[in-house]
Amino acid sequence: MSHDSPPQKTARHVAVVMDGNGRWASARGLERLKGHARGVDRVREIVKVAPNYGIEYLTIFAFSTENWKRSAREVLGLMALFRRFIRKESDTMMRDDVRVRFVGDRVRLDKKLSALMEGLEERTRHNRTLNLTVALNYGGRDEITRAVRRMAKAVKSGMLEPDSITEDTLNDYLDTADLPDPDLIIRTSGEHRTSNFLTWQAAYAEYVFTQTAWPDFYEAELVEALEQYRNRDRRFGASEAV
Ligand code: FPP
């Protein structure tokens, strides 16, 4: 699929850096995992309402390649949340016609979790209303590095001609090969960083940064972010809004 999304006022592909769970919990005297658990509730809600706003693709940053540096307790707690989410939400995804995909390097994930991920991808593969992509053990640079490694192998084996390589070729080797580029990337909780999220794909994305911590990101916050997006001129490098 081409990485250029057609210009339009509705954000067809929205991606979210769900930041601020830890701070949300600490501010309430709760342990960080409680913030992540509340974050799962917001994931459920946003997945449910996204199609009502014309969103066809929703991509969420659940765990980065850098998140392994957190305490063992938090990492294990997050992994348990992911397993529970997949088990509990599988029927809902079928009912709501949501296709779920995972991007990121699965090699380091435990076997039980990666088996659950594969099972959910397989079960939901014919669903069409919303494409939910969960970035898990994901890093943009890591994704590009893995793509280049596979391209180099393809060149070595004679399957790929170096002079034929275009942007589309590289795009096809990324974890996100089947997805259009994000139109809008939302980051919650006040940080103004991209944090290695969709590094290649975000080239022309609009960013919306909000102060709200992810556990407080209700439907109204999404509406507000979409409104900001609608008011932006997207030029894709051209001199006038396209
Ligand atoms: C960032 O907040 C959030 C994460 C690293 C985890 C995001 C995961 C969830 C919201 C769980 C739900 C996901 C799925 C797919 C079920 P932070 O911990 O960095 O917050 P802080 O910056 O306040 O410390």
Image (spheres, rainbow, N blue to C red):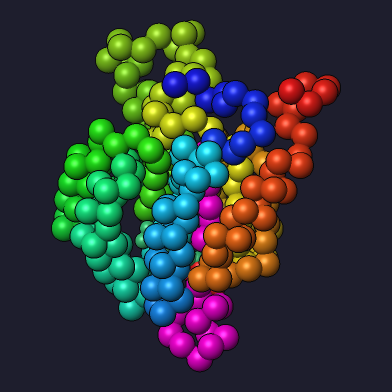
Q: Is residue 28 above or below residue 170?
A: below
Q: Who's the residue at 42% across and 52% down the image?
A: 47
Image quarter (top left, top right, bottom left or bottom right) of the N terminus: top left
Rendering coords of residue 157 (x, y %): 27, 15
Rendering coords of residue 78 (x, y %): 34, 68
Which residue is outermost to the right? Answer: 239
Q: Nearer the viewer, residue 73 or 37?
A: 37
Q: Who's the residue at 47% across and 44% down the image?
A: 51
Q: Who's the residue at 32% across and 47% down the image?
A: 96
Which residue is outermost to the bottom? Answer: 29
Q: Answer left or right for 31 relative to 232.
A: left
Image quarter (top left, top right, bottom left or bottom right) of the C terminus: top right
Is-magenta flag for residue 15? yes
Examine the image and state in which quarter residue 70 appears: bottom left
Rendering coords of residue 227 (x, y %): 69, 48
Is-magenta flag for residue 146? no
Q: Nearer the viewer, residue 155 or 168?
A: 168
Q: Is residue 115 above or below residue 158?
A: below
Q: Nearer the viewer, residue 56 or 96?
A: 96
Q: Who's the residue at 59% across and 38% down the image?
A: 11
Q: Is residue 34 visible?
A: yes
Examine the image and state in which quarter residue 188 appears: bottom right
Q: Is residue 20 visible?
A: no
Rendering coords of residue 119 (x, y %): 18, 46
Which span is picked out in magenta? 13-32
- Tally the marks: 0
